[in-house]
């Protein structure tokens, strides 16, 4: 069985650690900071064999120099020469094995142009989506276009509803507050907000989410909702799914 363990970093990042059964070899996703990873590995007597990178932002790659020097792991990530430590550069449709399990690469540009996601094995499947999809939200558009991001999110939303969503940040409560403004009558979202508040009060992660849950509560996956379009129309165009997404994203940027 593949276990996924959150290692908190910075103010709100999660570095996801993957471990197969009771073996000591592990993988981590997006280690922006080496220190908490090293502390966890030493405490649990584990060996870092693989690092997966979703995109080039420093809070996802900053730990690479120290971790690669210390452990010499295999490093897999996007085909972006900015990330010098990557040994295996992958792109959409590629697949590879980590800890004996097959992972598939999905290109999900929008937040950055090089952004990829990793779809992992099991029932349910495991999605490591970096800063593309969050619980209740999505990443800012630093490099891509609204059309690119909306297409990336639509692609993720088409995955099986039980797919577990391991986003890279604890943004859930802030995202759900915006979702409340964008779609006031969503009772499923309101119940989730209470659950997530209880989790945070206990210093527990609100992640992973699921694709099925995100389809129900995430405004950026609900651009066809008439209620949401009606509310968002006060902030811009909502004539199409793409224009509704662009309006929502601009509104959220200044919310």
Image: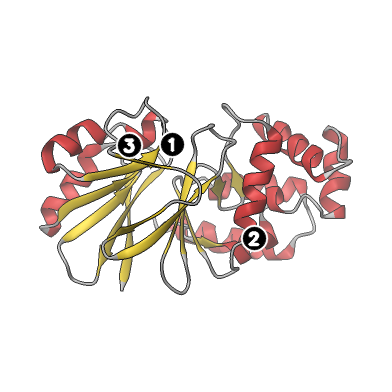
User: Which picture quadrant has residue 6?
Assistant: bottom left
Disc 3 vs disc 2: which is toward the camera? 2
Nearer to us in this view, 176 or 122? 122
Q: Position of residue 224 (x, y in %)?
A: 81, 53
- In this rendering, position of residue 119 left or right of residue 146: left
Mark 1–mark 2 Cα distance, whole angstroms, equals 22 Å
Vertical comparison of 204 with 170: above or below: below
Q: Secondary structure at mark 1?
A: loop
Residue 95 seen in the current view? yes
Vertical comparison of 5 with 234: above or below: below
Residue 130 seen in the current view? no
Q: Secondary structure at mark 3?
A: loop
Q: Circles 1 and 3: CB distance less than 8 Å?
A: no
Disc 1 vs disc 3: which is toward the camera? 1
Residue occupied by mark 2: 158
Q: Position of residue 225 (x, y in %)?
A: 82, 55
Residue occupied by mark 3: 32
Q: Earlier in the sequence, mark 3 or mark 2?
A: 3
Mark 3–mark 2 Cα distance, whole angstroms, equals 29 Å
Within 10 Å of disc 3 (Cα), the crowding (few <14, some 14-19, many 20+) is: many
Q: Residue at x 71, y 50 (%)?
A: 219
Q: Secondary structure at mark 2?
A: loop
Residue occupied by mark 1: 55
């Amino acid at each position: 069985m593949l276990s996924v363990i959150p290692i908190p970093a910075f103010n709100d990042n999660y570095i996801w650690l993957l471990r197969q059964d009771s073996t000591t070899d592990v993988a981590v996703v997006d280690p922006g900071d080496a220190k908490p990873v090293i502390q966890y590995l030493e405490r649990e007597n584990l060996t870092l064999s693989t690092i997966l990178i979703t995109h080039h932002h420093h809070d996802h790659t900053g730990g690479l120099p120290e971790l690669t020097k210390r452990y010499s792991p295999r490093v897999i990530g996007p085909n972006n020469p900015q990330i010098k430590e990557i040994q295996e550069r992958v792109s959409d449709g590629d697949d590879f094995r980590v800890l004996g399990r097959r992972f598939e690469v999905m290109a999900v540009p929008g937040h950055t142009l090089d952004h990829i996601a990793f779809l992992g094995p099991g029932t349910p499947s495991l999605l490591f989506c970096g800063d593309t999809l969050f619980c209740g939200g999505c990443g800012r558009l630093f490099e891509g276009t609204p059309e690119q991001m909306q297409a990336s999110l639509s692609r993720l939303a088409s995955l099986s509803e039980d797919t577990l969503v391991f986003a890279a940040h604890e943004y859930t409560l802030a995202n759900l507050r915006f979702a409340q403004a964008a779609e006031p009558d969503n009772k499923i979202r309101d119940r989730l907000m209470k659950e997530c508040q209880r989790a945070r009060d206990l210093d527990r992660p609100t992640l992973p989410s699921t694709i099925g849950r995100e389809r129900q509560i995430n405004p950026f996956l609900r651009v066809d909702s008439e209620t949401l379009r009606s509310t968002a129309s006060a902030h811009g165009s909502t004539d199409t799914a793409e224009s509704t997404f662009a309006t929502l994203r601009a509104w959220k940027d200044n919310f």
